[in-house]
Amino acid sequence: MDKVLNKNLEEYKELLKNFINTQDERSLYKVERMSKSFIRNSVLPEEIVNLHIQAMDELYPDIANSFHHSMNFLLEAMISYGLAHQEFQLLREQQIALKSEISIAARMQETLLGTEKPNIDGLDIGVVSVPAHQMNGDYYHFLKGNDGMLGLAIADVIGKGIPAALCMSMIKYSIDSYPEESMRTNVILESLNRVVERNVESNMFITMIYAQYFPDESILRYSFAGHEPAYYFNAMKNTFEEVNTKGLVLGVLPNATYSQKELELEKDDMVIFLTDGVTECRDDGRFIKIQEVLNLIEQYKHLPAQDIVDRVFKYFEKLQDFTLRDDFTMIILKKEV
Amino acid sequence: MTPQSFVTVYKEWDIVGARQIAREMAKELGFNVVDQARIATAVSELARNIYLYAKEGQIHYEVVETMNKKGLCVRAVDTGPGIKDISLVMQDGYSTSGGLGAGLPGVKRLMDEFDIQTKVGEGTTITTTKWVRL
């Protein structure tokens, strides 16, 4: 740092002399460049004041004492700024390190929780799930049973970010350990509820849907745990109906029970599952009404399921100026034949 | 100049005296103006900590010399409450709550060497040295 300063003293002195003689903009531009190089080299403000003092002493050896003292006074006043600057620098480095750690965690989350859209006879599936920040607090998972049955889990952790993401891994590995095909949806939720209640702090809750689709019978069976209702689109009547079952969010009571309901799907019928990131989309402080979502879906109903969810997402993304406030997940199951 | 001396910090104005001795010794040792100001600020911070948290203590000054370098060693000694969590007070932005850039991390930055000994209920000794840049 001393070398940088010594090299700069001559240059600074020249610029200062020029400026005092001519008050030209050129010198000011050059000192601006110099100031940026000081910042790059972590030169502190008190050192710049000192540089100025030295330059003035050499240029005007008979300068007034009062001016000289005033400059030393200024130097003293800069010391704490210098410290604050160093502290700021360090915190900035720490922030960069944290950010990169979070992005590694986010990638790991993707790997751990990754799921593929399965091919199910006669069923068209559309999925969109976009996190508001780096880590997604929404979770969905597809399972395909031996008999061609589809298992679908959707969960939303109340509380976002890294704790939510960690919690999701627990849900996923619990589900993986179940003999899923032989379990009823409500039994799966009851079992997950016990896992969550035992392992997660009491201030974290999870809402969840578990659904199974049986292509042979065209029947969807489902259970809800405090989750946003889903919507059933009846193609024949061209109407939407709420789909829901009563049940507490996961993790509140150890022995909570859940119920199961079922729905028979006809050709072009759809079931739309969402998380509250969809209905809590805000447009200038106004909550979006679910009707607006359903109107959009109705408008795009002739499209493949993936195109529908993509278009709905694009619409809401634009509405929120491309900054999501909450994780956004929407899944559509559309009966083909 | 005596090679070793100390001031007792008890009142806020004692901080000024502590700074002044540090600056005079630093000047005599040949520290440049910037380093004189840094040493004075570090001593000011140490003395202020004594005044605020320990109520009473001393700042000791000592000229230290090795074969090839010379410096000023400042020791802040108190018999106050001590510090429970050193790593916490040494963390940036902790004592200064959001970037006033002083506190103990500031002292450490202003000086070249820094050591802290503390025991809850018994007191704290901070030893810090700055070497003259040749």
Image: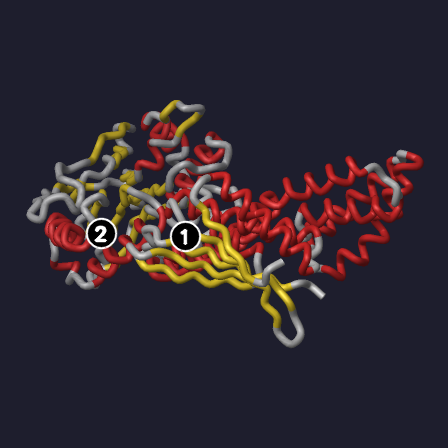
Q: Chain of mark 2?
A: A
**Is A207 rendered above or below residue A98?**
above
Disc 1 sits on a residue from what chain?
Answer: B
Badge 2 element:
loop
Along the line of sight, the residue nearer the viewer: A89 or A313: A89
Residue type of the residue flagged with mark 1: Val
- The answer, for residue A82, to whether it is visible in the render is yes
User: How far across and how far down the image is residue A31, in percent?
Assistant: 80, 44
Q: Quadrant of residue A106?
A: bottom left
Question: For residue A126, which numbered disc appears in the image?
Answer: none
Which residue is farthest bottom?
Answer: B67
Please give the name of the residue rendered at 85% of the width and 51% of the height, measured from the top-left corner: A11
Most extreme residue toward the front is B2
Locate the N terminus of chain A by quadrant. Answer: bottom right
Asked whether, in this view, residue A189 is left or right of residue A130, the answer is left
Which residue occupies the foreground of this view, B109 or A153?
B109
Residue B104 located left or right of residue A1: left
Compared with A235, A17 (above or below) is below
Foreground pick, A7 / A145 = A7
For mark 1, what is the residue? B89
Camera sees residue A221: no
Residue beneath disc 2: A215
Q: Residue at x 33, y 58 (%)?
A: A113
